[in-house]
Image (tube, coloured by chain):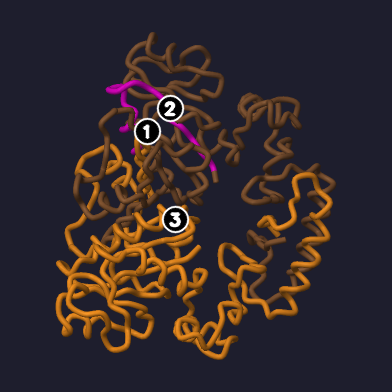
Chain colours: A orange, B brown
Amino acid sequence: MKVIMLKGVSGTGKTTTAEGIIRELRKRGYTVGSIKEIHFEAFTMETEGSNTDRHKKAGAHPVTARGLSETDIMFDHTLDIDRLLDYYDQDYVVIEGDSGANCPVIITGKTEEQLAEQVNSLTIAVSGVISNKRSSWRGLPVISGLTDIGRLVDLIEEKTPERMPNYSSDCCTACGTDCRGLTERILKGTASRSECVLKGQDVQLYVNGNEIPMVPFVKSVVRSVSKAMVGELDGYEEGAEIVIKFRS
Amino acid sequence: MKVIMLKGVSGTGKTTTAEGIIRELRKRGYTVGSIKEIHFEAFTMETEGSNTDRHKKAGAHPVTARGLSETDIMFDHTLDIDRLLDYYDQDYVVIEGDSGANCPVIITGKTEEQLAEQVNSLTIAVSGVISNKRSSWRGLPVISGLTDIGRLVDLIEEKTPERMPNYSSDCCTACGTDCRGLTERILKGTASRSECVLKGQDVQLYVNGNEIPMVPFVKSVVRSVSKAMVGELDGYEEGAEIVIKFRS
C-alpha cells in the first residue's frame, strides 16, 4: 500500500487536486482509499438523539451504522493516522490535509508565501491554483491537477514508496536515521525502501497488536521456520501473504 | 470477543434494551463496540457535495473523515457482517437489528405475535415492551431491560460464546454441523466452543487473507513451533496474542 498526502490552506485547489489524483489512479487500475482531515471544531456526522448516538452515549465505541447502501464506522476521537491507515488495504491512500503521516507530500497554494508555509522535506511537487502561473518553484515541479493530471500521477507512481512506518528515533534508528529521515532519503534517491529493517514487506511479528522489531537474522529464521511449517498444508500458495495467529 | 444481537420491529424497546446492555457491560468493566442495522432506504451520513463526498465520487473507497473529535470510516455498501466484525476487537459487540451474525439473540416485542415473528433457534431471551407483562414465553426467560438489566446481562455473560465463525455447510462441517448449528448446540449446552476446529481462539493461519483449516494436531504443531521461535524475543508476553506475517 502506498500513501500520498496533499497539504495547503482552504481555497488553494486541494480537494480538486485530490479528486484528480483519485480519478486518475482509478483509471490506471489501482484501488484507492482516501482520508480527509477536518479541522473544523464542531464537525460531526452524527445526529443528536439518533440510535447510534444513543449507543455512543451509553458507552459503545466504536459504533457502526450499517445501512442498505453504506456502512459507517464511527470512532469518538481523532484516530492516530497510523492506526487509521491499518484499516486500509488499497493500492493507494490519498490523504487530503496535514495528518502527520510519513509519506510524500504535494503542496497547494495561490501564492509563494502560502507555498513557503506548507513546504517540508517530504514535498515532491507543487499543485493547486498557483500551477497555472509557473512550472517550478524552489526546484520542485509545479504541475496542475486540472490540465496535467497524468504527469502529476506519473510522478506519484515514480516517487511513492510502500507505506513507511512512523516511529521516532527513540524507538528505532536501525537504518541510521528515524522513519521520517529514511523517507526523505528515499525521496531524494539516496536510500531505498529495503533499508528499513523494521517494517519491510518481509516478516512482521505482533504481540497484542504491537509490532516487535527483529534484526534481519531473526527475521530470516522466523520466515524460514514458518514457511517450512505451513508450506505443506492444503491452501498454501507460493508468493502469498501468510499470517499465523495464536494466543501464547 | 463476544457478539450479541437484538432483534425486533420498531417501537418494541430494541434501542432502549441495547443502551441498557451497553451501559451495564461497561459498568462491569468490559469494552463494548456496537453496530446499528439501518433498513431505511435513503439512509446516509454523507452530505452531498462535501469534500469526502467528492472523494467518493472520484472513486475512493473507503473514505474517512478524520475530525478533531471523531473519525468516521465510510464504506459505499453494506459491509458483510463478518467482515465488519473483523474491524472490532472489544470484549463485546452489541448488534441492534437483524444482521445475519452467528451469535445469541435477544428478541423484543409488544405482542406474542411479534415475538413469534422474531424468534429463532439462537434466541436466548425476550425483552422490550412485553417484558412488563410476563416472565417467560415458550420456555425463554422474559427480562426487562429497564428494571432488570443486571439479570439480562448476567444471562449474556453466562451464555455468549467467543465470536463464532459463520460458514455454510459447503465450507466446513468438521464439528459435525455448520457454524450456526454449532452455536445452537452451544446455547443449548450440548456442545462447547472448543468443538469448532476451524476458528478457535487457539491458532489461525491465513493465506492471502483466507483462513486455512487445520486439524487439531497440525494446529498444535504450528503453535508449539511458533511459540518456541518467538518466545525468546524482547517484547514477547505470555498470554498475549501473537501474529506472524510474511510473504512466501
Tag 1 residue: B37
Residue B188 position (above or below residue A190): above
- Magenta span: B2-19
- Distance from the alpha carbon under mark 3 to that under mark 2: 39 Å
The residue depicted at 84 percent of the width and 51 percent of the height is A232
Name the quadrant of the C terminus of chain B: bottom right
Residue B24 x %, y %: 40, 43
Inspect the image, locate mark 2, and give the three-letter code of the amino acid beneath it: Asp
Q: Which numbered mark, 3 or 2, is in the foreground of this view?
A: 3
User: Which three-letter amino acid code belongs to the residue tagged 1?
Assistant: Glu
Q: Is residue A211 left or right of residue A225?
A: left
Do residues under tags 2 and 1 come within 8 Å of each other at their CB atoms? Answer: yes
Q: Which mark is residue B98?
A: 2
Viewed as shown, does residue B33 lie left or right of A55?
A: right
Q: What residue sits 61% from the left and 27% below the top?
A: B180
Count of marks placed on residues: 3
Residue closest to the eye, B168 or B52: B52
The numbered mark, 2 or 1, whose residue comes first in the sequence reads 1
Q: Chain of mark 3?
A: A
- Taking the spot 48% from the left edge, 49% from the top edge, the residue there is B88
> Is residue B7 on the magenta stretch?
yes
- Which residue is the site of mark 3? A28
Q: Can you say whether B120 is above or below A69 in the image?
A: above
Within 10 angstroms of label 3, few (less than 14), some, or many (20 or more) residues? Answer: few
Q: Secondary structure at mark 1?
A: strand
Task: Out of B27 and A169, give the one closest to the viewer.
Answer: A169
- Neighbourhood count class around disc 1 (C-alpha, 10 Å): few under 14, some 14–19, many 20 upward: many
